[in-house]
Amino acid sequence: MKCAALFCTAVLVLLAGCHSYHIDTTVENRTGAPIQLLEVDYPDASFGANSLASGADFHYRIAVTGDGPLKITYTAANGAQAQITGPNLANRQQGRLEITLLPNGKADFHPQLTPGS
């Protein structure tokens, strides 16, 4: 019984030391029209969607494993390609990031992030 308790304690200590750093990201389409081929690039990875309706939100959880800027590309309803550079992200940051896509290829960024390492 004593060995089982020690084993359980050791496992709990090991699990408590593990921490997954992630950023809950929301992309909001407030361009006034649907967009196509949305891609969000961040250090060492990317995510996206084939389309995002006007007024729709897209949620994605990212784990940043490098340092560098966030970049967004998408195709607007008129066929123009938007390219936007956002805030710099750092390894092991965590928190929330809201990205609001605006008309004319503009965007607002609302980060609530802890410092990275």
Image (cartoon, grey):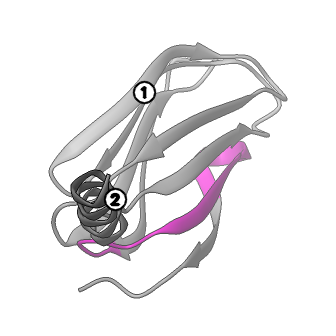
Residue at (73%, 44%) from the top-left corner? 103
Q: Which mark is residue 5?
A: 2
Name the element at disc 2.
Answer: helix
Say left or right for 57 vs 115.
right
Question: The C terminus appears in which quarter of the rendering?
Answer: bottom left
Residue at (29%, 67%) from the top-left corner? 69
User: Disc count in the image?
Assistant: 2
Tell me where residue 93 sits by quadrant.
bottom left
Note whether 102 is above or below 65 in the view shown.
Answer: above
Say left or right for 5 vs 117.
right
Residue 104 locus on image (x, y percent): 65, 46
Residue 110 locus on image (x, y percent): 66, 70
Q: Which mark is residue 48?
A: 1
Lower sequence index among marks 1 and 2: 2
Tell me where residue 2 sits by quadrant.
bottom left
Along the line of sight, the residue nearer the viewer: 19 or 23: 19
Region rendered in magenta: 89-107
Along the line of sight, the residue nearer the viewer: 66 or 100: 66
Note whether 13 is above or below 8 in the view shown.
Answer: below
Q: Amino acid at mark 1?
A: Gly
How far apart marks 1 and 2 lie (CA) works out to 46 Å
Say left or right for 55 vs 83.
right
Q: Amino acid at mark 2?
A: Ala
